[in-house]
Image (spheres, helix red, strand yellow):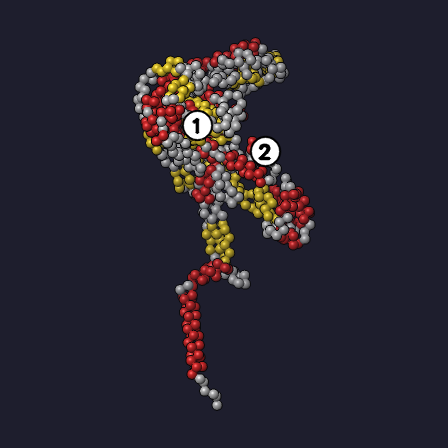
Amino acid sequence: MKPPVSARTLKRSSAMAIFLLLVFLFLACRIFAIQVFDFDRYQKKVLDQLTTESPVRAERGGILDAAGRVLAANRTVYRISLFPNVITASGTDTEKLVSGLCAAVEGLEPEKVRKHLSHKTDLERTVVRSTDRATADKVLSFIAENDYYEMLAVEAVSERYYPYGSLASHVLGFTGSDGQGLYGLELQYDKMLAGQNGAYITARDSTGNRLPNEYESFVRAEDGYTMHTTIDAFIQATLEEQLKATLTESAAANRVCGIVMNVKTGAILAMATAPSFDLNHPFELNAECAAALAASGLAEGSEEYLAKKAQLLLETWSNKAATEIYMPGSTFKALTCSAVLEEKAVIDLDERFFCSGALQVADRTIHCHKKGGHGSLTFREGLQNSCNPVMMTVAARLGCDTFYQYVEAFGLLEKTGIDLPGEGNSIFHAKSNFKELDLATASFGQNFKVSVLQMITAISSIANGGELLTPYLVESMSDEKGNTVYSHEKNVRRQVISAETAKTICEILAGGVAGNGGAKNAYVPGYRIAAKTGTSEKIGDDANARIGSCVGFAPADDPEVAVIIVVDEPTDGSRYGSVVAAPYVANVFRSVLPYLGVEPVYTEEELANLEKTVPNCVGWSRERAEQFLTAAGFEVAFSGEGSVVTAQTPESGSVLTPAHAKVVLTLGNTDLTMVPVPDLIGKSAEEAARILLLQGFNVEIVGARSLSEASAAVKGQFPAAGTSAPYGSAVRLYFPYEVSEE
């Protein structure tokens, strides 16, 4: 007989049974909830653990210039990697691997490979980030021959590629190793260029078997949009060529920059800073920066060395034309005079003023650039000759408030809104503190700073009839099917001045170029150029530091393009904008205007002095060549005997000054008559030309419009004195550009 169960025990058992029942009911409810309500969520968790997602990378959109030329694209390159942990564990002869890999990859240093191998626990190390197919094939053969399949790998990857190297480097920018835009347009429009990556998803069970198709999916990648820019590769290359030329000639200590802009739309046709950098290797220092780093004396690889290198890279990447600011100097006088005419503070362009060389403003004497003063001159001449006292006098008629309003109206107190990252903004006087003395110095472009982009945008408003436009770089974006997904619309920010005022200023500036104004070095035969030069001080330790600049637009009768070049701290020779900037602005116009279809219209005087291009007469009969060259305005001389031209001097394509344009034709043989080159340094233009003419040479001039206007002595020649050159060849004479500037 079993002993009776106590009430206490029954009570405990009942409690336990109830507890277990509750637990069971909770679990049952939870299982039901999971199976019914949370099924999808938990199924996803399980599938996430069992599925593999393979990314399908979107193709980054290309970048084109205004004519459809490819500025940025993608190309397939090959990445070479090694696996240190596998190599270490296998006991492989590392020196054999190192020597073989270096033999396959030209230029690969053994020490670099050994350094990667020293990271013994790393799963993977990239040895060569980018190489070509031929090198990749050599490495693959090396892997196959030595059974290095588990130790080395070659992977095909897509890489951003810039066909023109450094062209428009500060505008285009570049991408990182992951393809993300890091700078310039690549950064500004990164999302639109990058597209949307896709994915291929597969699923397997715990044993590794593939699950049914219902658990697989494919998300298509959406390639990035193609960018159509306003940049024209030809105009960009032209601008960069001239920036390099003035950088070399002036030895500018703080770089040079320039912009070419369509004044009617705001489209940027070219924008550049010199020196530039290679877009395909943006993290490599250019020659100038590499030299500066080497000269620093810092130990290679030290923290100071790496910090200096990083600083130089950042400076190199800086788009000087858009991000940095400077004092515009006398180029600003065009804006001052525009405001004066618009407000009718001057009505008669021939109203006379007197410049003694200085003007007393408040308690300060402010000097003109011409120490002795200009004497009596008209308002028109005041702008053309860049007279500071005239500017201060007419600005005072406006008053501080009105002048300030025009500074704001010309867009110099705000960013332009260009579609580039990092645009700089001006530094100007606070309106509440803008007093009489500030007005005086501001009237001729001193004691405030603007960006080069702000300045050309303001000047373009004069060129286009008074409209302040938003400059831009991207005309449109299109998808992979060619459909336009974005298109720029012209943005007129405001009407700054009337069309009448704008036309008047254009005429004054054009007269200064064509006549004897400070911008005469911006002259281009056959075209009416409106331009203003400037030379501004730099506030700092060096009291002699200057910035030389020139801004102009053409053709003056119906302007299409504006050009600005700014040279920061020229150190060799002249520091004036009329010398370090104006001739190079002229050279840009000389190339760009015909390219844009603007036909030259020559005056009779220009036609008389127009340079002539020598045709190719080799193989022609004596009679035909003589008749053709004479009709073209060349003097003809013969050497040798015969009836057929076998050689000529100068060769075809040479450009000669008409007054001394002689072509020597060699008949019957190819022996050229060699003549000693005389020493012409220090001689006047007329004397040098006479000597060359008497000795049978042609004349080519640089630095003057014509021989008659070359007032200074010859400062250089090519070929050098004492050498010999063919009879009839051209001797190049260099004259200093005339300084007629503030």
Residue at x 40%, y 15% (from the top left corner): 356
Query: Label 2, on which residue?
Result: 296
Q: Is residue 448 left or right of residue 155?
A: left
Helix, strand or loop at mark 2: loop
* First along the sequence among labels 1 and 2: 2
Q: Which quarter of the image is occupied by the C terminus?
A: top left
Observer-nearest of 435 and 232: 435
Say above or below: 226 vs 636: below
Amino acid marked by disc 2: Ser
Residue at x 46%, y 44% (from the top left corner): 194
Whole-percent x and y of residue 423? 43, 35
Query: Label 1, on which residue?
Result: 327
- Could you tell me if residue 318 is visible in this image? yes
Q: Is residue 290 left or right of residue 217?
A: right
Say above or below: 191 vs 522: below
Label 2: few (<14), some (14–19) or many (≥20) C-alpha neighbours in 10 Å: few
Observer-nearest of 628 and 697: 697
Helix, strand or loop at mark 1: loop
Whole-percent x and y of residue 551? 43, 25
